[in-house]
């Protein structure tokens, strides 16, 4: 979450809700064509001839090795598409990128393509920031894995295509489990998660030297456990928060009990910092099992000095997992020429020929059905079965909640979850506070 220039426009964009950004900051942005294709079923008009290639800006939100892979993919696209030049720029993690995109729309210098975390698609689309992709796709969206598409639509229009997609997984230290006489494939239920964690945890006097389990107290993992109890986060119409019940309380009660018993570590840190702590503890063998994203598979595998396994999240009443990661979107204020070029780029980046090597390099799931069925992917899964777990877990997959207010609401829920875990509020108090605040956000 790097800083950005604190102009009045940017402060306005960051302070207000998505719809408020555009109305309250009032910048005109890039000139928008009279024909954006929204609501149309015909292919957007071809661009007029120009003296050179169309240039488009692509903002992405993955750093490190994965960011380097994205840069390499963009270079390959540019080398093979002489009429389009894509200019990539890393903007920080999801939250920072989102803030910068909103500020850029208000200031009139927005990118043409960007990554948006899937639970924020509704907020961006509802605020008229995104272009309807239906006229561009012309049915091509059928190539994507159906289980990854539920966070691509808003009000029956296609606004996004899957790119770096994931589910949470249970990562296990198989060597540690074998040493404790446990099933090296990991626990299959909440009860087994508790019993495995008890046997894996170690103490020296009053000091806990090893925890059986650790997970960031994060909205994504909480969603998974709510789904496993037969619950939901939002009502069907998306206007009510529905976690102040048995299914919503059960995850907090499970985690609190495990923390108090000394068999689960609640990693310190805000947002992704807590994820980093959990992953480092796992690599350092200070914990035996963690929840984290399939997107961490490649790096964890490379750095683990033990037999590392990946498994489904343990089940409660049933297995269940939210999908996650980010989609690619097109910005509505780009010109027709930029939009046409943007769609060519988005389509290319998510084609089978690109998603297979991207998945292998990054650990994220391949996003097309043809990719999963390809000889190259099957050979890779045969060699590295951990990488197939997320795809197999999709049979129990749920979309992340889709409502314009959920971008802000998830932060409210997460804060209350953390208050309960730190003993600053009871489970009932935390969920009641989340519900009260949530109802106001969802009615905006």
Image: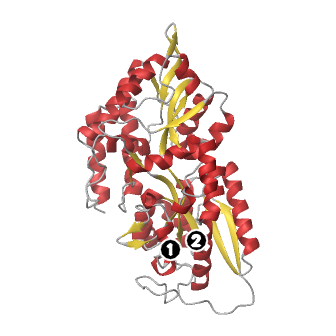
Q: Which residue is mark 1?
A: 140
Q: Position of residue 409 (x, y in %)?
A: 37, 52
Q: Position of residue 144 (x, y in %)?
A: 49, 64
Q: How many marks?
A: 2
Please indicate, yes or no, whether residue 352 appears anywhere in the rendered image: yes
In this view, which residue lies farthest toward the bottom? 48
Quarter-wise, where is residue 121 in the image? bottom left
Q: Disc 2 versus disc 1: distance between alpha carbons?
A: 9 Å
Numbered mark located on residue 422 in the image: none
Element type at mark 1 = helix
Element type at mark 2 = helix
| Figure check: 159 above or below 413 | below
Seen at 43% across and 29% down, the residue is 187
| Figure check: 111 above or below 164 | below
Out of 5 and 215, give the one closest to the viewer: 215
Numbered mark located on residue 347 in the image: 2
Out of 297 and 96, give the one closest to the viewer: 297
The crowding category of the residue bearing disc 2, from other C-alpha atoms within 10 Å (few below 14, some 14 to 19, many at least 20), is some
**Which marked residue is nearer to the observer: mark 2 or mark 1?**
1
Please indicate, yes or no, whether residue 92 appears anywhere in the rendered image: no
Labels 2 and 1 touching (C-beta < 8 A): yes
């Amino acid at each position: 979450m790097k800083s950005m220039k604190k102009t009045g426009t940017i402060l306005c964009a960051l302070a207000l809700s998505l719809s408020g950004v555009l109305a309250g900051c009032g910048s005109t942005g890039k000139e928008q064509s009279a024909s954006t294709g929204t609501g149309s079923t015909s292919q957007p008009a071809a661009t007029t001839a120009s003296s050179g290639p169309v240039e488009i800006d692509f903002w992405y939100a993955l750093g490190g090795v994965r960011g380097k892979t994205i840069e390499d993919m963009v270079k390959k696209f540019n080398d093979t598409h002489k009429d389009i030049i894509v200019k990539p720029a890393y903007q920080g993690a999801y939250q920072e990128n989102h803030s910068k995109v909103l500020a850029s729309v208000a200031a009139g210098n927005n990118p043409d393509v960007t990554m948006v975390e899937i639970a924020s698609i509704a907020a961006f689309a509802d605020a008229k920031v995104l272009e309807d992709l239906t006229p561009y796709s012309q049915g091509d969206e059928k190539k994507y894995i159906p289980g990854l598409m539920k966070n691509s639509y808003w009000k029956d229009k296609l606004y996004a295509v899957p790119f770096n997609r994931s589910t949470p997984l249970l990562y296990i230290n198989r060597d540690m489990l074998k040493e404790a006489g446990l099933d090296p494939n990991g626990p299959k239920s909440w009860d087994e998660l508790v019993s495995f964690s008890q046997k894996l945890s170690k103490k020296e006097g009053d000091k806990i030297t090893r925890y059986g389990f650790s997970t960031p107290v994060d909205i994504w993992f909480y969603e998974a456990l709510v789904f496993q109890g037969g619950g939901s986060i939002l009502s069907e119409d998306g206007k009510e928060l529905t976690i102040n019940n048995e299914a919503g309380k059960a995850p907090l009660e499970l985690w609190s009990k495990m923390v108090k018993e000394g068999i689960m570590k609640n990693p310190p840190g805000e947002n992704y910092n807590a994820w980093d702590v959990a992953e480092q503890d796992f690599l350092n063998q200070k914990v035996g099992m963690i929840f984290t994203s399939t997107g961490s598979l490649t790096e964890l595998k490379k750095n683990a000095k033990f037999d590392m396994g990946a498994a489904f999240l343990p089940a409660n009443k049933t297995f269940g997992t939210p999908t996650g990661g980010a989609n690619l979107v097109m910005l509505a204020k780009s010109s027709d020429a930029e939009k046409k070029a943007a769609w060519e780029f988005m389509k290319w980046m998510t084609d089978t020929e690109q998603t297979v090597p991207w998945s292998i390099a990054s650990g994220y799931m391949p996003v097309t059905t043809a990719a999963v069925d390809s000889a190259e992917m099957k050979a890779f899964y045969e060699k590295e079965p951990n990488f197939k777990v997320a795809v197999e877990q999709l049979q129990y997959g749920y979309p992340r909640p889709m409502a314009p207010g959920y971008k802000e609401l998830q932060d409210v829920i997460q804060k209350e979850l953390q208050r309960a875990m730190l003993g600053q509020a009871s489970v009932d108090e935390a969920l009641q506070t989340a519900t009260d605040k949530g109802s106001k956000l969802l009615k905006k």
